[in-house]
Image (cartoon, coloured by chain):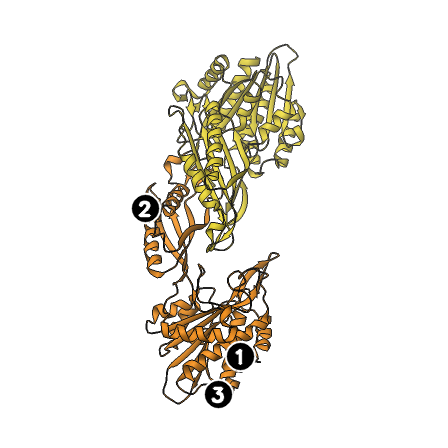
Chain colours: A orange, B yellow
Amino acid sequence: MSNVLTHYQYLHSIPEPGFEEVKTSAYLAEKLAAAGFKVTRNLAGTTGLVAEYDSGVPGPVFGIRADMDALTHIINGKKEFRHTCGHDAHSSMLLAAAEEALASGIIKKGRFKAVFQPAEELGAGALKILESGVLGDVDYLLGMHVRPTQECPAGGAICEMRYSAGCQFRARIKGKQSHGARPHLGINPIDASTCAIAAVNAIHMDPRIPFSVKCTRFHADSGVFNSVPEFADITFDMRAQDNPTMKEMREKVIRAIENGAAAVGAKAEEFEFYTDFPAAEGFEPGFAKVVRESVAEVVGEENIIPAFNTSGGEDFFCFPVNLPHLKVGFVGLGVGAEPGLHHQDMHFDPKYLENGVSIHCRVIKKILG
Amino acid sequence: MSNVLTHYQYLHSIPEPGFEEVKTSAYLAEKLAAAGFKVTRNLAGTTGLVAEYDSGVPGPVFGIRADMDALTHIINGKKEFRHTCGHDAHSSMLLAAAEEALASGIIKKGRFKAVFQPAEELGAGALKILESGVLGDVDYLLGMHVRPTQECPAGGAICEMRYSAGCQFRARIKGKQSHGARPHLGINPIDASTCAIAAVNAIHMDPRIPFSVKCTRFHADSGVFNSVPEFADITFDMRAQDNPTMKEMREKVIRAIENGAAAVGAKAEEFEFYTDFPAAEGFEPGFAKVVRESVAEVVGEENIIPAFNTSGGEDFFCFPVNLPHLKVGFVGLGVGAEPGLHHQDMHFDPKYLENGVSIHCRVIKKILG
């Protein structure tokens, strides 16, 4: 048995939000250095860190990436950080596997990198890791995420998580304020937004590729009920199973908003992108086979799900999108997570984390052994 | 010269919001009692008051109504009460005219009532005056309002202000919350509201009668940008030149909202009416002639505007709508108000208030002299 439960117990007790994973990264750095890794902290000025081990023998460079951040919840009116997406589990599994790999001496060739990234939930952490350059020489990169029971039963695993592209942005629709008695002197940004949303809802995409777009927020208020407000802020959430579909949809959505608003004389003048996750790409048959074999050895052939399409997003896929040489794998781990990820009461059985550690170690051994 | 400027100076210095006109009504009551009126305060449990004078000789009952409340503004981020609609002027003119009427002994027959109502801006004060019953025996009721320069030049007057019906209400559109990745499991209240607003904007009314309806507020937010919210609150402002048009439009607007929301499976389940002013009615040729002659005698025939249609609202017209026997008049007084009523910096030249006092006195004399 690895140290995964000890690590998990501690990391679970110190949930920290994106880019503020100070105690979390300090703990990881200390344990990794103690295990014999060369640790580099504060990647690109963040809490991100990388632990490297060079076998001294020529060979591939293999990396595993885990995320560290917790979520911010409003619970009984009070802001509270909680690990409701299992990133504490991801960091614990990677730390335990890294310790195990050095202790058991399975790395015979090439180099190994354990990469701990901040702020996955903010959609900004992966970009910082890219900026730091630590993945520039990596040939294979593996990610792992605990899954809810609906997707993967406890004790099972998904060999290839096919995340969707996801993008959330706000548009400001600028009209012209007027008194309710003189609507002809104003330009109503609510009418303009209504036209924009109707146009967005009329977008057709290839129906064979999963996609969706919806308005999730609408704010327009002059402060009184008898005035046409000056502007409206509308937020959209877009999802697409692949990146070309997202690109095409994004262009159509912006065209719909700009022209829908213009239809009544208003102007869509600001687009603020909150998050922008690319869809999964970078899978490669050879590495996929290694990952699948490792997963099957640990959970049993009867408990694997070869691949799963999810409309969820994961900023991990910023890596292969920006580093085309990178071959990636992403495993979904069945841990009995209920009632769902991001739910304030999300919980799972930590005993299944040992499976994640074993999968990591087996992939390390197959690539670098 | 009357006491109008003294009264105005004091009332202007103590702006109080609707139903909280405590100092204002105390001042009015004290002055009216001192002038010889029988004063009844706290009409229907409010700050409203009536000052009565009975000539002892059979004759008509004539009333003049003034409003007392100030507006609430947010100025440099701080809540502040200001008399930006001139109700301090209206109360001052009526008080000064009432004093003058008794002092000069112009009331020879019938009875006179000076009615001071609270909360005109809230659209609720007139209903309280109705509830108190003080208008039950009134035959003629006169109202007066200062006007902005655009409508009536300083020193002039409008003999008949034809206010529009105005109504503001909020509808709650209930959908069903869902994650942005699973929009098919929810019902988007923003889409439902978009359908409702589009349906409202498609309403046709007789184009010969001025009307308008517009959405003035839109709030929908689950707290995060990647969830479909549970509900949306949309507020509408409706105006119509006459009451049958408002009634028909209101039915069509509610039908549009209910069915627009239902088109995507949502439900319009709450309608909260903030204000509901009827359009001007109750004008009667005989009384209109008296008012017009009085106005012309004071400001000069060349400075009168016989009638003016405004899309603004005035809760005064709750009186004739609810008391069909009542003959009403409503004068607009040109005082040089700039830049517009309800503007936080609204100002005018108080010297023109003497015209209002004189008009009141002349109408009193013509009806009760």
Residue A210: percent from left, percent from top: 39, 55
- Kindly give the residue lying farthest to the front in the view shown: A302
Q: Earlier in the sequence, mark 3 or mark 2?
A: 3
Q: Which of the 4 image quadrants contains residue A143?
A: bottom left
- Kindly give the residue lying farthest to the top in the view shown: B58
- Under mark 3, the amino acid is Gly
Residue A96's tag is: 1
**Chain ID at mark 1:** A
Disc 3 target residue: A105
> What residue sits 54% from the left and 44% below the top?
B80
- Under mark 2, the amino acid is Asn
Disc 2 target residue: A259
Mark whose residue sits in front, 3 or 2: 3
Q: Earlier in the sequence, mark 1 or mark 2?
A: 1
Q: Are marks 3 and 2 in contact (CB under 8 Å)?
A: no
Q: Earlier in the sequence, mark 1 or mark 3?
A: 1
Label 1 in the same subunit as label 2: yes
Quote the CA–CA distance across marks 3 and 2.
62 Å
